[in-house]
Amino acid sequence: MLIAYKYRMYPDEGQREMFLKHFGACRFVYNWSLEQKIKVYGIDKKTLTRFDLNNMLPNLKGEFEWLKEVNSQSLQEVNKRLDSAFKRFFREKRGFPKFKSRKNPIQSFQLPQNYIVDFDANQIRLPKIGWVKTTLHRTFEGVLKTATVSMTATGKFFISILIEDGRETPKKEPFGYDSTVGLDVGITDFVTMSDGTKIDNPKFLRDSIKRLKVLQRRVSRKKKGSKNRDKAKYQVAKQHEKITNQRKDFLHKISSKVVSENQAIAIETLNVTGMMKNHHLAQAIGDASWSGFFRQLEYKCEWYGKTLLRIGQFEPSSKICNVCGSINRGLKLSDREWTCARCRSLHDRDVNASINIKKFALQDQNLIGVIAPADSRGEPVGDVING
């Protein structure tokens, strides 16, 4: 099973300079390779593979001598990443690859091999850089795969090491109605569970927005290119980093709790990108980080042998009565509670949605009876079978 371990690195001045050279060289090669692919396709309608680009690197090093100071395998990994970006563009429609800017707050380079981890000395040896002091707070055993060195906007260095530990992915544990939980994410409550449990949304960005505005105004008042402006930008980056760390810590705790307490988890597929186009809710949706939460649920379910069930994004889970199956077509986003016109059941909107998400997911697994569809008046057609 592939697992990544991330550690904080503390390079000295010379090693820091080599890190920056690697970041700059990899960014340069990425932009150069992207330009070559665009030019060749525009002229000859041919596609350059990453192997073609790697064969062109020696000539590029002859033209730019400073590229020889950088680990050659890191430069070849750049072309591999560019090739993957084009595959995502054509297969998944993820957007055409963009040229990288030196102003990007996150810089990184990769090492496919030839690095050494020493847990006893708390050091990692990197090609052309040497032994770098690292806080190796967790040990691991397995085959070393790709290592990624990155620098944050606040100037902190990290290394993420991918290993193959030799373990098989756990088999999925059996699940039923009682061992499955439905999750409905929201803005007021971050997640509502089908058992009625609600977890408040901490809204880390909202709580820090006033401080961020103050810091950003200080940046705008400083002279461009001055050291004082750089100091002010550092404070803004530091505040953003604090918000990010708070959010990650919260998401990890919630996702681990949900996965450990249930055999199966049912969620709704959401078009978060489309929802972010609503300028009234975009900041709140981004602050909640639903996509990050779902991503953590997905890989943690794989780790621990649990099952993640998804339903379609167009299922009207909030408007369907989980008792009789009738549809409340007049339900508005502002309505947090509603009463079913047919069975007179009082529903909390979010709890009702999470119950329906659970039922729809189990219905797809043939573990629960079908929730009957309703006619234009909201009346169910046929019999309703509840779990």
Image (cartoon, rainbow, N blue to C red):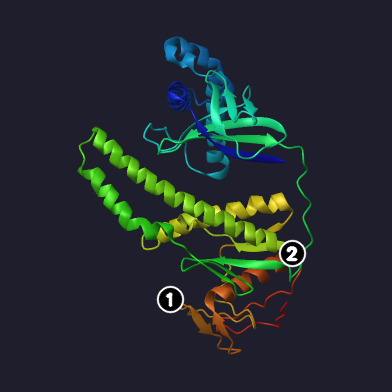
Q: Is residue 211 left or right of residue 350?
A: left
What residue would you read off at disc 2? 365
Who's the residue at 53% across and 18% down the image? 128
| Amino acid type, label 1 | Ser
What residue would you read off at disc 1? 334
From this viewpoint, is residue 386 visible?
yes
Q: Is residue 375 left or right of residue 281?
A: right
Who's the residue at 64% across and 35% down the image? 162
Image: 330 above or below 182: below
| Quarter assignment of residue 35 | top left
Residue 83 percent across, percent down from the top left: 55, 31
Residue 275 percent across, percent down from the top left: 45, 59
| Quarter assignment of residue 106 | top left
In what element is the residue under mark 1? Answer: loop
Residue furthest to the top in view is 62
* Residue in the foreground of this view, choosing between 138 and 373: 138
In what element is the residue under mark 2? Answer: loop
Q: Tally the marks.
A: 2
Image: 382 above or below 113: below
* Residue in the foreground of this view, choosing between 111 and 155: 155
From this viewpoint, is residue 39 visible?
no
Q: Upstream in the sequence, badge 1 or badge 2? A: 1
Q: Quadrant of the N terminus?
A: top right
| Amino acid type, label 2 | Gln
